[in-house]
Amino acid sequence: MILHLKNVLTDEELATARSLLADQAAWVDGRLSAGAQAQTQKNNEQLAQDSEAARALQPLVLGAVQRDPLFFSAALPRKVFNPLFNRYSGATNTYGAHVDGAVLHSRTTQQWVRTDLSCTLFLSDPDSYDGGELVVKDTFGDQRIKLPAGDMVIYPGTSVHRVDPVTRGARMASFFWVESMVRSDEQRRLLFDLDMNLLALRKQHGETPETTALTGTYHNLLRLWADT
Ligand code: NI
């Protein structure tokens, strides 16, 4: 499932993020943090994880996703990787086809995270740069994703994906991974659909014996499938 979450960041948070990610921020070669296959494809910049800007931005991003009910429903998070930040511009402007490592070490939280879901939170106005689409291969073909600043995409960590070259301007984003309580993308999808349709039914008809019963079904499925 590929899901678009709108307005994850407020305008104020976006402005804060952009000012912390200005040119004087601690940008380093993105290859420093890539695995062997990804290193051959990766040509971007990343914010040093131990920099002041990273330490200020991580709680800002985590706070924003954690207050988003769609994020919780779609990801059913057990562990969230400390958010990272990247920039594509000038001569360091692309990341070819690759897969993310299955298990990655989150430095701030000092824990290993299984990468069930990948998240990209767009920080640059899409009109301010050309190219830079996140291209995710899924069963329906290539999905080309370029979202408004402050919006986020969640996609399966199992996918081959790339970032196309940025040919004008700069594309900045935050990215991180989620280990879900529900490991299977298919099961997570079923739970998400059930949850969203229950929300819609309640909006139309209020609480009924059927919505109560189906809410029970949701929780019973979650109980069957979740690991905490
Ligand atoms: Ni990746």
Image: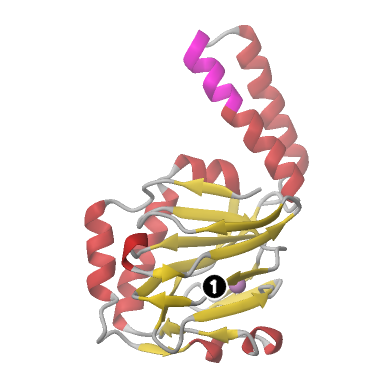
Q: Is residue 125 visible?
A: no
Whole-percent x, y for residue 223 in the image: 72, 38
Q: Is residue 119 above or below residue 49?
A: above
Residue drawn 34% across the image and 75% down it: 169
Residue drawn 71% across the image and 36% down it: 190
Q: Is residue 181 above or below residue 201?
A: below
Whole-percent x, y for residue 213 in the image: 67, 16
Q: Main secondary structure of the magenta part?
A: helix
**Quadrant of ligand 1 in image:** bottom right
Whole-percent x, y for residue 28 in the image: 42, 90
Q: On the image, numbered disc 1 is attached to which residue?
A: 164
Whole-percent x, y for residue 44 in the image: 48, 84
Q: Is residue 7 above or below residue 123?
A: above
- In magenta, the rendered stretch is 197-205
Q: Quadrant of residue 161?
A: bottom right
Residue drawn 70% across the image and 49% down it: 182
Q: Is 138 on the left-hand or right-hand side of 8?
A: right
Q: Is residue 6 visible?
A: yes
Q: Is 175 on the left-hand or right-hand side of 171?
A: right
User: Is the C-beta of the residue carrying label 1 under 8 Å from the nearest atom of ligand 1?
Assistant: no
| Secondary element type, mark 1 | loop
**Label 1 amino acid?**
Asp
Is residue 81 or residue 136 the one in the foreground? 136
Q: Is 148 on the left-hand or right-hand side of 40?
A: left
Q: Is 30 on the left-hand or right-hand side of 59?
A: right
Residue drawn 34% across the image and 84% down it: 51
Task: Give the crowd class for mark 1: few <14, some 14-19, many >=20 residues within 10 Å.
Answer: some
